[in-house]
Amino acid sequence: MTSKSISPNPVGVIGAGSFGTAIANLLAHNADVLLYARRQETIQTMRTTRTAAGQSLAPSVAPTDTLAEIAARCNVIFPIVPSESLRALMQDLGPLLTAQHMLIHGIKGLDVQWQSHTTTLPQLSREHVKTMSEVIQEESAVQQVGCLAGPNLARELAQGQPAAAVVASHSDAVIATGQQLLRSDRFQVYSSTDLLGVELCGVLKNIMAIGAGCLSGLGYGDNAKALLISRGMVEMVYIGQALGASVRPFIGLAGVGDLVATCMSRLSRNYSVGYRLAQGESLATILQHTEETAEGIHTVRTVRGLIHHYAIRAPITEAMYRVLFEDLPVQEAIHHLMKYPTNVDVDFL
């Protein structure tokens, strides 16, 4: 046990990608950590080189390929996997968990149970779309659920640069535990009781990040990016309110904070997707040569179904959908956005 440990048991992290590994190393400041990876080659690399996703592992981080060990030894678990993998993960992990376990996910995506061989989704209502916390509760006995969100580019976390995040939950105990485990002299942790709002912030900003990458790929400058970020924030609020969230999280660290970071940085996977689209690459080629998931691609499809059902004004989401799935040229999408009729700057306060 690390000398700084504030937990009698190790903390579990499920997912040894770039963000999962960065979070495991942050947690290692305050506790021993079990880092789970499904692939045997990843486990072997962690054990032989003490690295994962290109990052050195802290001494108190131990690799494991057994979910049963995570469930048996860890009261607090951080699932950090692609959103499309969470339900299957929870179907394996859920039977091993009890109401005493606490799960704080770091996943910025939505779960949609829709079987189709096309990219087109029907109009989706809130009942068709689940947040990650809802998936966790549906597939396990766990009730103590939280979400970790904020401007947390994995590479900068790995470099030890100052950063901050929000732990959101309906449970004060989850928030307090998340803050105690994650806080360090280079990582600040704030709190929110609007779990839905914080989860939606992390989801929706990925759409805007793809758009920001498109602008950069076309050679546009900071004025254009600022326009997209500000109008993107308005669009995020409209969607969030329609789905039951309050405005508060969107103007905080998980909302505007994460939005600015991902729309201004080439380290963002979603920004990179937009940039490459604007440079002429096809979505199929981008997906073929991208190792880690850009959640915004799936989010665009899902949110497009939601905005049609709720009749939400969401021109950026509509434009990104057409670029990604209907082969609309990026330059033409920008042209349509600039002609979109709007008068009032902010009307949600």
Image: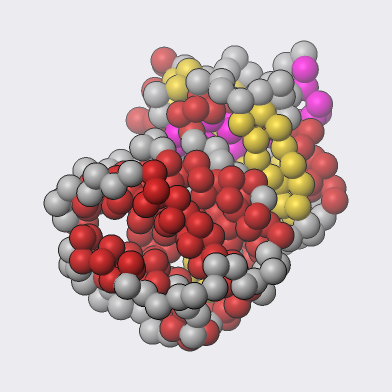
Q: Give the tally of numbered discs.
A: 0
Looking at this rendering, what residue extends furthest in the front direction? 343
Q: In the drawing, does residue 1 fall left or right of residue 127?
A: right
Give how far across and how far down residue 69 sits, in percent. Answer: 62, 38
Q: Residue at the location (72% across, 37% down)?
A: 189
Answer whether residue 23 is magenta in the image.
yes
Looking at the picture, the colour scheme in use is secondary structure
State the extent of the magenta-drawn residues as a range. 4-24
> Which of 117/279 is in front?
279
Q: Residue at the location (52% across, 84% down)?
A: 310
Displayed quadrant of residue 70: top right
Q: Is residue 294 visible?
A: no
Q: Residue at the location (45% across, 50% down)?
A: 226
> Which of 163/123 is in front?
163
> Which of 343/177 is in front?
343
Q: Is residue 135 above or below residue 294?
A: below
Q: Residue at the location (41% across, 15% down)?
A: 49
Give how far across and how far down residue 66 sits, in percent. Answer: 54, 39
Q: Is residue 165 above or below residue 114?
A: above
Give how far across and how far down residue 322 sits, in percent. Answer: 27, 70
Of the 4 image quadrants, the one containing the C terminus is bottom right
Give how far across and how far down residue 332 sits, in percent. Answer: 21, 66
Q: In the drawing, does residue 58 fall left or right of residue 189?
A: left
Q: In the drawing, does residue 160 fall left or right of residue 98?
A: left
Answer whether residue 323 is magenta in the image.
no
Of the 4 image quadrants, the one containing the N terminus is top right
Q: Is residue 332 visible?
A: yes
Looking at this rendering, what residue extends furthest in the right direction? 172
